[in-house]
Image (cartoon, rainbow, N blue to C red):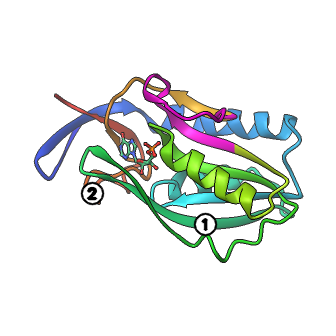
Amino acid sequence: MRVRLKDKDFELYIPRTRIDQEVSRLAAEMKEAGIGDRTVFVGVLKGAFMFFSDLMKHMPAGSRQEFVFARSYAGTQSTGRVEMQGLNTLALEGCDVILVEDIVDSGLTANYLAGQFQETGALRVRICAFLFKSEVYRGLREIDFVGIHIPNYFVVGYGLDYEEEGRCLPDIYRLLS
Ligand code: IMP
């Protein structure tokens, strides 16, 4: 199956059934790691909106959900800079925090945010990414929970966009070269 977004063609890469399996597995892994009632989950918008909502359906009612907005991509490339909104209003002092990302690529966004959370007094910060391009990762922090490791493909769907298109696709597609 293929989709065309603006000037680019994409082919089906990870179907919804596999996504559901990995979300359930991740949720079980998190529970085993002691994540529960006192945890604060911070979703990174816009990309993480679908993954965050699927994952949170498995979490206990006492956990807290928050969001920040980050932008580092233009087209199919990272700009190398991270624009942030919403950091100032997060109250994370003394909290066990899980940063929830749609995808970790260079790691710039996740490492910067995790550092900021720690500076504002979070007790512990762990990173959860649905997709992880480990071969291009340049961050120092461990990615504690990973849905699926992928090569350095540009992907869309399940929250991820190409120039703001493709986010609402329920499956994940990769760019055809
Ligand atoms: P990083 O800061 O380089 O790790 O990039 C993280 C952000 O870049 C993600 O939250 C996405 O918004 C965006 N991004 C990275 N790779 C892709 C991709 O393959 N497709 C769409 N967006 C991506």
Q: Is residue 101 visible?
A: no
Element carrying mark 1: strand
- Which quadrant of the view contains residue 81? bottom left
Q: Is residue 108 left or right of residue 151?
A: right
**Which residue in the rendered view is the most extreme toward the bottom?**
89
| Circle 1 residue | 67
Q: In this view, does 163 lie to the left or right of 97?
A: left
Residue 106, image x and y in percent?
A: 45, 37
Does residue 23 lie above or below 68 as drawn?
A: above
Q: Which is nearer the eye, 154 or 85? A: 85
Q: Which is nearer the eye, 2 or 85? A: 85
Quick check: which quadrant has ligand 1? top left
Mark 1 beta carbon near ligand 1 (under 8 Å): no
- Circle 2 or circle 1, nearest the eye: 1
Residue 110, image x and y in percent?
A: 56, 47
Residue 56, label in figure: none
Q: Identity of the amino acid at label 1?
A: Phe
Q: Can residue 4 be seen in this view?
A: yes
Q: Which is nearer the eye, 21 or 40? A: 40
What residue do we see at 84% from left, 59% from top? 95
Does residue 70 lie above or below 124 as drawn?
A: below
Does residue 124 lie above or below 12 as drawn?
A: below
| Circle 2 residue | 165
Q: Identity of the amino acid at label 2?
A: Glu
